[in-house]
Image: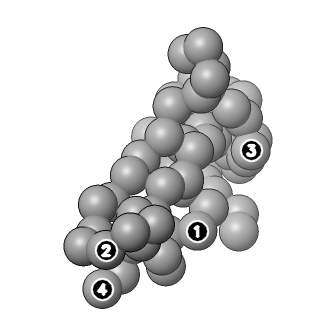
Amino acid sequence: MVRNCPDCHSHMEMGCTLESTHGVYVQKKRKGLFKNTQNYLKAAVCTVCGHVTLYVENFEEYRD
């Protein structure tokens, strides 16, 4: 997926990682054992203005 900066509309560099000891992740808790969804956050960085956008690659897993 190609992302463009919402501020300057330039190409954004995808796949940058966030580090906070063991990474930063988003988790959706569900009922049942081992049914939680968890994905590490990724960042897209605009190489022109420095705008940063956070995203998860497997966003479909958060749909019910």
Residue at image mark 2: 32
Whole-number angstrom distance, CA of label 4 to CA of label 3: 26 Å
Crowding around mark 1 (Cα neighbors within 10 Å: few <14, some 14 to 19, many 20+) is: few
Q: Are marks 2 and 1 in contact (CB under 8 Å)?
A: no
Which residue shows up at 29% across the image and 60% down it?
A: 29
- Is residue 46 placed above or below 38 in the rendered structure? above
Q: Residue furthest front?
A: 33
The mark nearer the N terminus, 3 or 2, is 3
Residue at image mark 4: 64
Query: Closer to us: mark 4 or mark 2?
Result: 2
Whole-number angstrom distance, CA of label 2 to CA of label 1: 21 Å
Whole-number angstrom distance, CA of label 1 to CA of label 4: 14 Å
| Image mark for residue 11 | none
The mark nearer the N terminus, 1 or 3, is 3
Residue at image mark 3: 15
Q: In this rendering, does residue 49 appear at all?
A: no
Q: Amino acid at mark 2?
A: Gly
Q: What secondary structure is marked by label 1?
A: loop
The front one of 50 and 57 is 57
The mark nearer the N terminus, 4 or 2, is 2
- Is residue 25 placed above or below 59 in the rendered structure? above
Q: Residue furthest bottom?
A: 64
Q: Amino acid at mark 1?
A: Asn
Q: Are marks 4 and 2 in contact (CB under 8 Å)?
A: no
